[in-house]
Image (cartoon, rainbow, N blue to C red):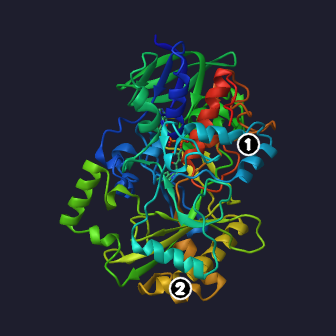
Amino acid sequence: MDSFDFIIVGAGSAGCVLANRLSEDARNSVLLIEAGGTDRNPLFRIPLLAGVAYWYKPSNWAYQTTPQAGLDGRQIKWPRGKVLGGSSTINGMMYMRGTAADYDRWAAAGCTGWSYRDVLPYFRRSEDNPERDGDPYHGTGGPLRVTRARAENPLYTAFLKAADAEGHPRNDDFNGAVQEGLGPYDFNIRDGRRESSATAFLHPVRARPNLAVWTRTQALRVMTDEGRATGLLVRRNGTEQLVMARREIILCGGAINTPQILMVSGIGDPAALQPFGIAPKVAAPQVGRNLQDHLGVYLTYACKDPITLYSLFRPDRAALAFARAALFGTGPAAAVPLEVGGFLRTRRDLSEPDIHITFVPGLSLETTQAGQGQHGYLINFYQLRPESRGTITLASPDPGAKPLIDPAYLAAEADRTCLRDGVRLARGIGESPALQRHKAADLSPQGSDLASDTAIDAWVRRGANTIFHPVGTARMGSDAEAVVDADLRVRGVTGLRVADASVMPNLIGGNTSAPCMMIAEKAADLILGRPAPVT
Ligand SMILES: Cc1cc2nc3c(=O)[nH]c(=O)nc-3n(C[C@H](O)[C@H](O)[C@H](O)COP(=O)(O)OP(=O)(O)OC[C@H]3O[C@@H](n4cnc5c(N)ncnc54)[C@H](O)[C@@H]3O)c2cc1C
């Protein structure tokens, strides 16, 4: 029977980081298992194709939510990467960390050792950001390349000027001293190609003899013996086998799969497990609870000028752009077309931004609104810290079956208010002369959709969609209900930790991939008993 010191479940944003760091010491034998296959596909390399990669079925868990009462009963598609690099191989590559206050709140809520002061060194350790060399908030020489957007489309400039006219501040580093304001973003792009967790952390160390990577291998259950996690039941090449962990198993399966693995292994709310005939081993009622996601809305406009992404929808131009990106890492296909935006407050009395707003010089594939097939642009925003809380629950005891996902979007009044206020703010920028100059027509919302609070709420319910940031389903904390403690150890089981988006007690104000990598960086030090890096 195979056995390793450490077994990591899931080669996503977090799992690849952990595999790299745990195998740095040649004395540690490490197995990284990944349900999906390799990431050798140009689709995952060319940044402009991100919108296609999001939905590419062969490398996707292709989940969807239960009908959402807050969204007129719609079911929302939730793509998640099932491939080396996990969701970082299919995501939008935006590099964002959240704010210092987000992590200070984690620490205040009982996550000792996770204040901003504690986590900043880990963000820096991962990072290779030559353009911000010497900046105390950034790192150089780490595995993960971070590159500033060039934002060459003139509509980006128009958006920023429109926002200036509305009195919104500028910012040139959302991961620096201040998050508030608008400007060009940073991306995980290296020389014009996607930088995923796999390209940054895994591929460069694949040759280490003490690191085994099993793709197309799905973890089915954690095996425990007298309260200790001893091994994993996996399905590999169509057959089930046991693989043993001498020291630890670390779950990095993401905010949907990690709680599912815990539950089918008997770690969860006993009352929820019993109907499926699963014998409860550890009563952990919060497994699968506390689900949070960012919900976004899209204001779309038809554009008078032929300067949008639609220009690339001609075979000759598209071929040229993709050839330039593939061969040289340059041109319009070497960027993700959401290069400018930032963080704003919907009300002056707020102490910090409550929305993340982004401009796209094209009509994105994500929007469900009418108006595709023409020159257009859109303004997208989402609420940073929603109050609604949802659940991941089992639909079946079969580890291969999809669990039920209920994010309970817009259940909280505060969330509805924020989106309503955000629509007015975004609309203000859209109506400002610098953008008006390019506008041919409002696509959505139309004037009547904005006639009253009720009309705005109805428009939001019809069109709002996920921003793909689920977290919180194996919550970290020091209280008795928390699923993992501040060292990421699953309560009630030894030799088992979680290190991925599920441990976040609360969503941070921004995108979630870099925070997951940070969690794994810190997890490696916790597991190996190493001191934190010095800033
Ligand atoms: C379409 C999309 C766009 C996004 N855009 C951005 C963005 O621009 N910027 C940003 O910061 N964030 C973005 N995100 C969010 C971000 O990518 C995720 O929050 C982050 O990647 C989650 O990391 P993770 O390690 O928790 O899980 P994942 O990266 O999802 O990794 C989990 C891995 O575990 C594997 N796995 C799961 N279950 C098992 C099992 N039982 N056995 C074996 N393997 C298993 C999965 O196949 C996967 O590879 C986006 C996400 C998506 C889906």
Which numbered disc, 1 or 2, marks the residue that appears first in the sequence?
Answer: 1
Quickly name the residue at label 1.
Answer: 117
Which residue is more in the foreground, 222 or 96? 96
Name the residue that disc number 2 marks. Answer: 431
Q: Between 194 and 174, which is closer to the camera in this rendering?
A: 174
Q: Is residue 234 above or below residue 296?
A: above
Left or right of residue 48: residue 467: right
Pointer 2 residue Cβ closer than 8 Å to ligand 1:
no
The residue at the point 55 percent across, 27 percent down is 21
Does the rendering let one see residue 493?
yes
Q: In the rendered structure, which amino acid carries the disc numbered 2? A: Glu
Tell me the quadrant of the picture where the C terminus can be found. top right
Cα distance in 3D space between marks 1 and 2: 40 Å
Percent position of residue 394, x then y: 57, 42
Where in the figure is residue 257, as x and y percent of width and height? 54, 39
Residue at the outermost top position: 1
